[in-house]
Image (cartoon, coloured by chain):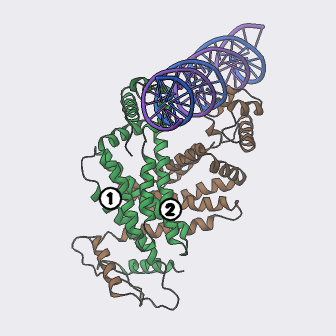
Chain colours: A brown, B green, C purple, D blue
Amino acid sequence: MARSPTSQRLADAAIGLFNERGYDETTVDDIAARAGVSRSTFFRYYRSKEEVIFPDHDALLAKVEARLRASTADTAIVAICDAVRIVLAHYVEDAEVSLRRYRLVGRVPALRHREIASVARYQRLFREYVGDWLAGTPDAPLRAELMASSVVAAHNQVLRGWLRAGGSYDPFEPLDHALQYVIRTFRHLENMEGPREGEDQVVVAAFPRSASPDDVMDAIRAHLGSRQ
Amino acid sequence: MARSPTSQRLADAAIGLFNERGYDETTVDDIAARAGVSRSTFFRYYRSKEEVIFPDHDALLAKVEARLRASTADTAIVAICDAVRIVLAHYVEDAEVSLRRYRLVGRVPALRHREIASVARYQRLFREYVGDWLAGTPDAPLRAELMASSVVAAHNQVLRGWLRAGGSYDPFEPLDHALQYVIRTFRHLENMEGPREGEDQVVVAAFPRSASPDDVMDAIRAHLGSRQ
DNA sequence: AATCGTACGATACTGAGTCTCACAGCATTC
DNA sequence: GAATGCTGTGAGACTCAGTATCGTACGATT
């Protein structure tokens, strides 16, 4: 986990040059020169010029996976929230780096694509675990996909807001708020299964007093639609 | 919209070579040679080697945006479903191309990243329009993000299933089914706002007869939790 | 002191993507 | 019917990312 001094010097040199001249205007030779090493050494530490900006996504992904693997379907919601918090915490830990990277990524399409791709890896991870936990329930793959994408979207929304604000507040409260939305959605989908065979169910809807009869009919139709 | 013959020959040559030799083993020179043109001409028609696989995302994106722009908050749900259907229809229209691309993208990381990046553009588009439609409501940006990501996730899940099955069935029925999930989620979030000031609301829950009193209490607590 | 492994530098090479220039075809204009 | 201008194309040079190979200096081990 501890980064080598050479690796750190390379990252500093790279970020410095990217900010001074721009990403495209900086060559790997420039970075290596400023860090006082050869071009070969750069590519020994980072597989590509982009990677110098996203150094530890692999480690973070591993941490998230470890957290998910430590849980079962029973504790799924807690596990997911924990996992998301781990990711956000990682950004908050060295906020300056996150902020510099955020500003850089906003200006360079190639880096933006890279970032999007790594977000997709988290989403895939969530999808796989949620899919396992949901195995056997109806529409499991679909619901896994929806849950994973919602969780990731909630995280990203909170993170982007925090980054745009310059990291000036504690983002964990907004994160919990956002995750509440997602959790309620999960619960709602769970309850939407409809009655099991051999069980009656009374269907009732709640409306403000101002609701028109049409509103009521629409809602009832929508509810019945979920069971045909 | 009509592709020039040269552009078409280049695309055919590229896909053919990618399938025969693999993506990385095919150079732009190879593609140009098979198409009977020069390397320069290749880069006049396609800005990069990757782009030859994803030719018309821009046009499709424009169509989707046009559909979204033609709507207001009142008809938001219909607009979104239409927009998603437009995208799926585009894949279904020339299914062979979609299938070949799908198989290729599954094997080549660089192409996968490109695909993910273009999906993100659709999600961004949805997020912007939904955000406008939701403007003024509480947590509008968060909910816009969640809705956009859910819509895109639903589409992708259906599309991937269809592609994996070799395009052997009509995917619009599964799409509608998936969109139902999303719409119900929207509705649920809408209704979760709670009663407006000055309006009473009767809160009622529906349960199978087998539900225990604890189940009932949990549900009521969850519902009330959304309003504190 | 001999040896082995590791890290680094130097160099050459492939291939993507950019740029510039020259030229051919084809229409317009006088 | 020649001069003019526009458009699409080919040719070639160039930059730079990324890969592969080789030689070597340094430090640890025995």
Task: Return the residue nearer the eye: B29 or B202.
Answer: B29
Q: Is residue B109 above or below residue A147?
A: above
Measured as percent of width and height from the top left, residue A155 is found at 56, 59
Residue with the mark numbered 2 = B127
Residue with the mark numbered 1 = B175
| Mark 2 or mark 1: whose residue is earlier in sequence | 2
Name the residue: 51% across, 71% down.
B134
* 2 or 1: mark nearer the eye: 2
Task: Return the residue nearer the eye: B52 or A137.
Answer: B52
Label 2 SS: helix
Measured as percent of width and height from the top left, residue A183 is found at 47, 67
Name the residue: 70% across, 60% down.
A167
Mark 1 belongs to which amino acid? Leu
Q: Quadrant of the N terminus of chain A?
A: top right
Name the residue: 47% across, 39% down.
B51
Measured as percent of width and height from the top left, residue A107 is found at 64, 48
Q: Report whether A91 appears left or right of A78.
A: right
Measured as percent of width and height from the top left, residue B87 is found at 38, 54
